[in-house]
Image (cartoon, rainbow, N blue to C red):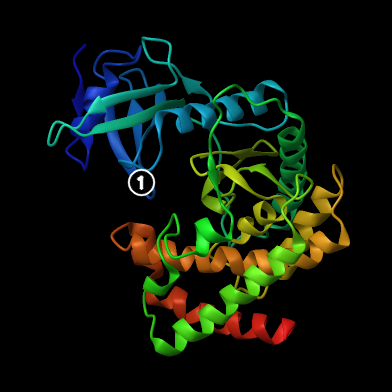
Amino acid sequence: MAIETEKTVGTAIAGLALALYDLPRHTTARLISISENEMYQLTAPAGQRWALRLQRPGYQSLQSLASEIAWLVALREDGVAATPIPHPGHDGAWVQTVRDPANGEPRHMVLFSWEQGLQPSIAMDLRPCFRRLGAVIARMHGHSRAWRRPPGFTRFHWDVENSLGETGRWGNWRDGLGMNAARVDLFGKVVGMIRERLAAFGSGPDRFGLVHCDLRLANLLLHEGEVKVIDFDDCGFSWYMADVANCLSFYEHLPQAPQLIGSLLEGYRTVGEVSQAEEEALPTFLMFRRLLLVAWIGSHAETPLAASLGVRFTDETVALCSAYLKRYR
């Protein structure tokens, strides 16, 4: 099969990957985003499109990726949520691996159907979208509690230590952009408060389980009145209410944030219950996510998203930290 790829970062690897799937001749690969991974749009001469996700080296194991796909397939097949449709390679496996021609390093990848839809924007009135999303999240959480995971299922744990500890999965918040001694002290007090409050909140199976973990606007699509949930790459074990708070990722500081959380809860409660204790924990989960994002931006400064947020994101986090400490002292 002849493969044609545009000259973009990683397209040599993407070109090798195309031969692993049943794709039309002369399919092209174009890099469309870099975040935790590289995402390519594949286009066939007749116009068919797919999304190829090329994993960052070392971030996910083969078994972890297979576990991700098992859950998102189950969510779709069980009628819980509109999730991406994966395509197996010639060998029948969802996850394929090629060697980087530059250094021989293995690179895992997954091919998905191209999903139709509009990515929601913070400039929109997101309340109707978030009410629908809240119901979707509640169904996903219900599925998570009842689903019998396949043998060997393994995913990340997004608890306090793995998120905000010294060796956090997305880096150390102390290395965030624009940090100084005063901010390290302030943010450190917030992390201590988060630890204390989440320890009291608990992580029993009624509050902590398999969740998407990254339900930010970029991982949603609106199509014909439906909210689609995409990019399960960071799905893992965390608090169910953290999954709700994550919908405000990068926008926790905006004045409409409390109203949007209210819309999420309104939709959630049409399907599942939210206790008073869970609702009262949401400010802590918003801060938990915010500091995790400070760490992510610091450790991914070379990506377009992190570069666009820059030091400003840390600057805007200072007021959130001060308000959080004032709230609970």
- The correct choice, above or below, for 15 with respect to 157 in the image is above
Query: Residue, x 70% and y 39% (percent of image)?
Result: 225
Q: Quadrant of the C terminus?
A: bottom right
Q: Position of residue 262 (x, y in %)?
A: 78, 62
For this rendering, which residue is in front, 146 or 217?
146
Query: Residue, x 57% and y 81% (percent of image)?
Result: 189
Is residue 257 among the parts visible in the rendering?
Answer: no
Q: Residue furthest bottom?
A: 182
Query: Residue, x 72% and y 44% (percent of image)?
Result: 137
- The correct choice, above or below, for 247 with respect to 157 in the image is below
Q: Position of residue 203 (x, y in %)?
A: 72, 53
Q: Residue furthest left?
A: 102
Is residue 313 among the parts visible in the rendering?
Answer: yes
Disc 1 element: strand
Q: What amino acid is found at the position of numbered circle 1 in the picture?
A: Ser
For this rendering, which residue is in front, 25 or 197?
197
Residue labelled with disc 1: 33
Query: Residue, x 61% and y 22% (percent of image)?
Result: 150
Q: Position of residue 162 (x, y in %)?
A: 51, 56
Occupied quadrant, residue 328 = bottom right
For this rendering, which residue is in front, 97 or 137?
97
Q: Would residue 55 be found to the left or right of residue 212 on screen?
A: left
Occupied quadrant, residue 173 = bottom left
Label 1 Cα crowd, 10 Å radius (few <14 / some 14-19 / many 20+) = some
- The correct choice, above or below, for 213 with respect to 286 in the image is above
Q: Quadrant of the N terminus?
A: top left
Count the marks.
1
Q: Position of residue 40 (x, y in %)?
A: 34, 36
